[in-house]
Amino acid sequence: MQGAATIIVFGASGDLAGKKTYPAIYNLLHTDLLPEKTFIIGYARSDLSREEYLSRITAHLKNGSDKDKKKFSDMTDYFHGQYDQEDSYKKLSEHITKLEDERGIKKGQRNRIFYMAVPPSVFVPVAKNIRENLCTDEGINSIVVEKPFGKDLESSTALSKDLGALFKEEEIYRIDHYLGKEMVKNVMNLRFANMFLSPMWCSESIDNIQITLKEPFGTEGRGGYFDEYNIIRDVMQNHLLQVFSLIAMEKPKGKDPKSIRDAKVQLLRETRPIDIKDTLLGQYISNGDKPGYKDDETVSDDSISPTYAALVLWVDNKRWKNVPFILKAGKAVDTAKVDVRIQFKDVPEGLFTGSARDELVLRIQPDEAIYFKFNSKSPGLSDSNIMTDLDLTYKDRYKDMRIPDAYEGLILDVMRGDHSKFVRDDELDAAWKIFTPILHQIEKERIKPHPYKYGTRGPDGLDDFVARYGFKRHVNTRYEWPVQSVSK
């Protein structure tokens, strides 16, 4: 960005900005990755004093010294205004120009990043006013849009059309923070930089793939929002589908953004719309002192919004013929984790019939890891098989390691003009074509989710559901992690 940028954060008083956007920008400052002449303007409807604003945006800063935090505070200010009133934006434009003049920023350097951490209801009014009042012809304009990108194909198409009428596609950065997570970024390296994986990454070797997201907390404080979107729209149509795309796409022609996103779009267009017979839906109920989903006063008593879903994707191409991709996501379950579990086929009949299946596991969070579970001879005089693993747990393997927050890397990519980890308009269209039919069917037919207790694994029938698609849980095979005794 030629040494200068003005970042305008819309929705600056909200949780997303305070917990994610500002800490990410601060960490870029702390690691000397921001352009030298960077200034941040927070914009929101809340009438905040400077002290109140600074208190909100610094509450979640974790790294650096007091000197760093003072420097960060000195390079930001707050501008109070409405989202739908042109006069507010005209005053903001004057303020931005004044700050650029004071910093001695020349023509060609007056780059502006508009970060929209705002509710979906004001996406278009904010974007329209940005285009008409805040964009510059003396630098680069970039607009960052947070999910949700619509609620179905129709609303997403309308939003894309509205944004497309205002901004060029190369100016738009649709952010899905899962694409900035360390292990998700590692998928391409793992797949395409390791020759030994190439021949086995297909239906000839792989039986099924599970992509799982588990959260041990409910919708506390978000019941009204969540009831409108449900678990499928909230994390599966976006976060888990992005992971699926990188796991399953063909090798891109290059490492450039266009090639990577072309490969993802091709895969999504080969993926069938989800069938109701390939779904399991759940909704958590109270358990002890933990409230149920409908105990939230913002949620209606007759809500059918699933808080847990298991969905199966099928890809109509040669590589993935008859391989089920099982996507599972749930709130108020037993633990916190996001991982990908690739289970290979049974060994052929013969010497080791009945051996446990090999599995390659990518743990996205917490504690990033890649481990390969396989069969080996039990140490000592026995010739019996045991399940063991090759384990790459980042915190155990790497010294002096700092894994940046996902937003940190993505905001840096915006500054670099790198679109490879952002969602393109045709990719969004292909994604919604997979999910819209099942979402509409659930709502039209009012399909009731199965109840499950807060803090459990999910609805009854989950094990039977995944077993139906070939997953084998080897309950009789002893496997202990990270260290296993062989004396038992």
Image (cartoon, rainbow, N blue to C red):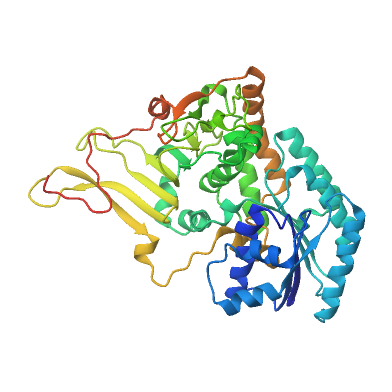
Residue visible at 61% across and 46% down in the picture: 264
Residue 38 in picture, x, y percent from top left: 72, 74
Q: Quadrant of the C terminus?
A: top left
- The reply, left or right, for residue 215 in relation to residue 252 is left
Between 341 and 115, the one lying in front of the other is 115
Residue 60 in picture, x, y percent from top left: 57, 62
Q: How many marks?
A: 0
Quadrant in the rendering for residue 225: top right
Residue 394 in picture, x, y percent from top left: 39, 61
Q: Is residue 332 above or below residue 138?
A: above
Residue visible at 40% across and 55% down in the picture: 369
Residue visible at 89% across and 68% down in the picture: 94
- The reply, left or right, for residue 427 in relation to residue 209 is right
Residue 342 in picture, x, y percent from top left: 41, 42
Q: Is residue 420 above or below residue 342?
A: below
Between 435 and 314, the one lying in front of the other is 435
Decide if residue 263 is in sight here. Answer: yes
Between 214 and 283, the one lying in front of the other is 283
Between 154 and 308, the one lying in front of the other is 308
Residue visible at 62% across and 66% down in the picture: 58
Residue farthest along the left direction in this orientation: 381
Q: Quadrant of the N terminus?
A: bottom right
Decide if residue 254 is in sight here. Answer: no
